[in-house]
Amino acid sequence: MLVDSHCHLDFPDFEAERADVIARAVAAGVGRMVTISTRVRRFPDILKIAESFDEVYCSVGTHPHNAHEELDITADQLVALAEHPKVVAIGEAGLDYFYDHAPREAQAQGLRTHIEAARRTGLPLVIHARNADDDMADILEDETGKGPFPFILHCFSSGAELARRGVALGGYVSFSGILTFKNSSELRGIAKTVPTDRLLVETDAPYLAPMPHRGKRNEPAFVANTAQVLAETIGLGADEIARITTDNVFRLFKKMPRPADVDG
């Protein structure tokens, strides 16, 4: 069994065939999918999808691109929404200095609000970090000093130092289809340095389809391709990396139940 720890099933790309996409994932051995919130004000749409499919769970939060639009969303509100049994994570929140769609101060403020919610709920914070390695690591270290909280550096494409500092704080590192790209040798080198008990795989669907699907719309079934490359990168078999990453998911996403037929 594999788990797609990060996808966006509410996006318009899947509107016409969402049930088929989920069915293909299940047929490919993907037993759980976490569909990730990008705007709290659209959370009802995310929750409806999670409630409609046994294999799908969700998060609640505001993407850094939209941070300035939802600065009025409080940690109390996030905590309250996270009480729903289908909500297993906070976020995604973070820092994106590549696009800078939101003022950096707003991104940092939103990130700290989400950290507070993750700390209070014990749910993992899904972190988006792009071109912001130093500031991200500094905020994580500062906030961990106020009290630990679980987190994932999702769709990891940052530098080795952020991975090192994140793991040192207890964080997990999730790899997407980027890991499979021919020009990602440096990223594969970083993957080798991450302890196996901190590794996750994801699609970030509909984006970043792994080889050999690159250039197509991504979907949760394709997480198997990323898992295969991760296995080859760190010198393990496909079955072993599936077991490791799945165990890691259920250790981190404590509210998300394992399927009844999966040991662990």
Image: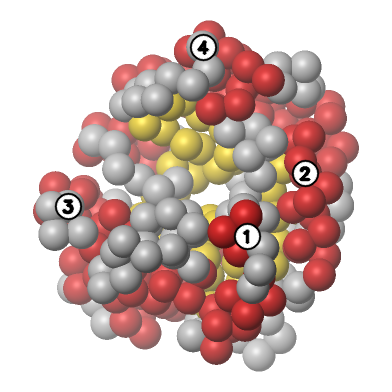
Q: Which residue is mark 3?
A: 184
Whether residues under marks 3 and 4 lie with C-beta atoms below 8 angstroms apart, the answer is: no
Which mark sits nearer the N-terminus, 3 or 4? Answer: 4
N-term mark: 2 or 4: 2
Residue 82: percent from left, percent from top: 80, 44
Q: Which residue is mark 1?
A: 9
Q: Nearer the viewer, mark 3 or mark 4?
A: 4
Q: Does label 4 or label 1 sit earlier along the sequence?
A: 1
Who comes first in sequence, dot 3 or dot 1? 1
- Do the residues bearing badges 2 and 4 touch, measured as CB atoms within 8 Å? no
The amino acid beneath tag 3 is Ser
Location of residue 157 in the rendering, given as x and y in whole percent from the top left corner: 30, 43
Q: Earlier in the sequence, mark 2 or mark 3?
A: 2
Q: Which residue is at a point 82% across and 65% down the rendered structure image?
A: 51
Which labelled disc corresponds to residue 43?
A: 2
- Which amino acid, by three-letter code, is at mark 4? Pro
| Residue 155, disc | none
